[in-house]
Image: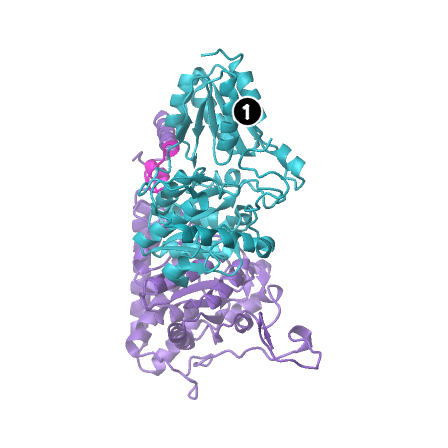
Chain colours: A cyan, B purple
Amino acid sequence: MATSLLPARPGGCRFDLGFRSAIARVQPFIRKEPKATLRNGPLHAVAQQKLMWEALREAVDEEMEADPTVCLMGEDVGHYGGSYKVSYDLHKKYGDLRLLDTPICENGFMGMGIGAAMTGLRVIIEGMNMGFLLLAYNQISNNAGMLHYTSGGQYKVPVVIRGPGGVGRQLGAEHSQRLESYFQSIPGVQLVACSTVANAKALLKSAIRSDNPIIFFEHVLLYNVKGETKEGYYQPLERAELVRSGKDVTILCYSRMRYVVMQAVQQLEKMGYDPEVIDLISLKPFDMETISNSIKKTRNAIIVEECMKTGGIGASLSAIINESLFDELDHQVVRLSSQDVPTAYAYELEAATIVQPEQVIEAVQRVVGTAVPA
Amino acid sequence: MDFPGGRVPFTDRLSFVGGAMSPSQPTSCYRTLDSTGACIVEAEVPHDIDEELALKMYETMVKLQTMDVIFYEAQRQGRFSFFMTSNGEEATIIGSAAALSLEDHIFSQYREHGALLYRGFSFLDMADQCFGNVRGHGKGRQMPIHYGSKAHNFQTVSAPLATQLPHAVGAAYALKLQGKPVVTAVYFGEGAASEGDFHAALNFAATLSAPVLFICRNNGWAISTPANEQYKGDGIVGRGPSYGIPSVRVDGGDARAVYSATAEARRIALEHNSPVLIEAMSYRSGHHSTSDDSSRYRTAEEMSEWRARDPATRFHNFLVSRGWWDDDRERQLRVATRKEVVDALTEAQKGAKPPLADMFTDVYADMPWHLQEQAAEARAHAERHPGSLHGIPLE
């Protein structure tokens, strides 16, 4: 069942551990790799394969270099370099003030970042784990989301709230949060989910330059995926990405589910199906232009998401598709979501909580019917 | 011994600190004027007030009182939805605001509009906001009293208590990073000091060496909850030293003491790159808000006793004792101010309301498609049912 991103259990690399209690344990591992990478060559080499955390780090580095008002704050982001290395060694270049280690209090450093953003900075706020940002929900919703509006446009809050989210590997319920569903209804915040090395860097760079408060979702299991980046590229935050062009069915996904879907697509191709795969990227607002053009072509839509079925991203997207594209559909919209349960620690139960490639294959078969070989 | 948590001496005595185990006297309350407004000659006054400053402070206190009375009545007449007064805390608010530079950023709770008045915000600006008209800086989006003016370095008030405290720390950090030699001043009540944000903000400011003045208005009441049900220990000031923050308790009814303490706190904050905590002791002489009737939980005797200790009268007596003020000027100021306030309310009430289209702007920097769609739907609905607009324009 495991995708190539899920190391075989047990003994695979545990890059997904980022919570406080585990830092000491994983530190020897996460310290080794970046040093080797830095020694082996420049991080900025064009067309060089890099890991997602390196791409994210480059985005932060380049934006901090270009704009002295950009800063990053959170727990362990300074000399430690962030639990997922996104600010690795940047404190040496920019100093401890711009790479600000704060005491532990999510609502506190969130409020601090918002206050700093109201006062002229562009602030990247790192949540060590997205789940902990529920502690900062008050500041995110009441202040980051609303102050631009309630101040009559006087105060902008250019913050990027970023960090690892999603279901990792046996991290238990509180460390396996999919907060996009919690955040999507807050007026005034924009939601972006990166999924590849290329889009992680290009989207983060755009997010830092945006005047809107952005919640930027990185997936805990994707920090070590490999890929290339396009230098100097700023990817539009509101545009979806066409991952695979096809004609049978539109599969809408985001974040790590892109890989689950593409794993299923390999099988589906062999079975004679020709699905179109779209990575939403923007979870609020949805890129309905790309989505509706695709659905008008395929006349079918399957949503594959890691968040909960009730009140989730898929629930919103499905409603919009039903409202605006009802006549374009040959089959009702199908949602493949996580179960509406806290994520269990036990490996097997955790796996059963999230969507598996087999479910995507079955959904395509159900929606499209028997494959007609091209 | 050097523990990672600190260098501490050993002892062979087992003793507990704090609470019932080590009763101590409460921190004294600094004052320079007695309860009648007479100067306490031996008082230490590192930053005294000259005539020009004293007159500006007093005039603003009178403005604040006049506005509070008339705006309060206007609310009771149903002219707008909500109001809050500063009665009993005028000296705390004006005394501290006067000690700040205009470049200092103020983060307020909601009962500090006197500081905004002191910075030149007009009655009309406030009335426009309360009526939510098109001229109002908040574009009719925020409830009365929740003012905000970037031009006056006064952040828009956010209703959930104490969220402004970490904002002030962040602003101080931003200003420090920008190399500006200024402080941020953040106001809050003793009730708000029970919020987690208070503790986080003090700890953040101390550990990050942020020049923030934490100004607590301890007015004794958090709506109906008295201060003695809000905390144990030495009030709010007692918490400062445990966070490593220089702290002072001041008589909030003594404008001269508040001024001097705030000016000194500001000096300490800038010289030592440190936050400072000020606890100003006063009394909320009015109701919490127009939604409250404090006679339900406070005795008439208590309220009338405190009303008799009007901080403005006390400061007035100080001015008279210095020969800076007289009855004629008092009469003229009161009459002129009253007219200004009434005129502002009349003018603001006549102001056009924001158009329907304004409902959708400023949510994002640019309007996303879903808001454009909702704006179009709202407009179409209004065009079909013009009465639903209650007279406001579409755009």
Q: Most extreme residue toward the front, as rendered?
A: A40
Where is residue B305 drawn, in percent x and y? 53, 71
Quarter of the figure with residue A210: top left
Q: Between residue A149 and residue B220, name the one nearer to us.
A: A149
**What stretch of residues is rendered in magenta?**
B354-371
Badge 1 density bin: few <14, some 14–19, many ≥20, Cα 10 Å? many
Where is residue A128 drawn, in percent x and y? 52, 51
B134 within the magenta span: no
Q: Classify B94 as above or below B157.
A: below
Secondary structure of the residue carrying tag 1 is: helix
Q: Is residue B140 visible?
A: no
Residue type, numbered disc 1: Val
The count of marks equals 1
Q: Between residue B291 and residue A110, name the one nearer to us.
A: A110
The residue located at (65%, 40%) in the rendering is A344
Where is residue B170 drawn, in percent x and y? 42, 59
Q: Most extreme residue toward the bottom, as rendered?
A: B42
The residue located at (54%, 66%) in the rendering is B220
**Image-based side of A344 in relation to B79, left or right:** right
B364 within the magenta span: yes
> Mark 1 belongs to which subunit?
A
Q: Between residue B322 and residue A241, name the one nearer to us.
A: A241
Where is residue A71 drawn, in percent x and y? 38, 55
The residue located at (37%, 38%) in the rendering is A237
Q: Which residue is mark 1?
A: A360
Quadrant containing the C terminus of chain A in the rendered view: top left
Q: Between residue A292 and residue A348, name the one nearer to us.
A: A348
**Image-based side of A116 in relation to A366, left or right:** left
Q: Classify B34 as above or below A224.
A: below
Q: Is residue B105 visible?
A: yes
Quadrant containing the N terminus of chain A in the rendered view: top right
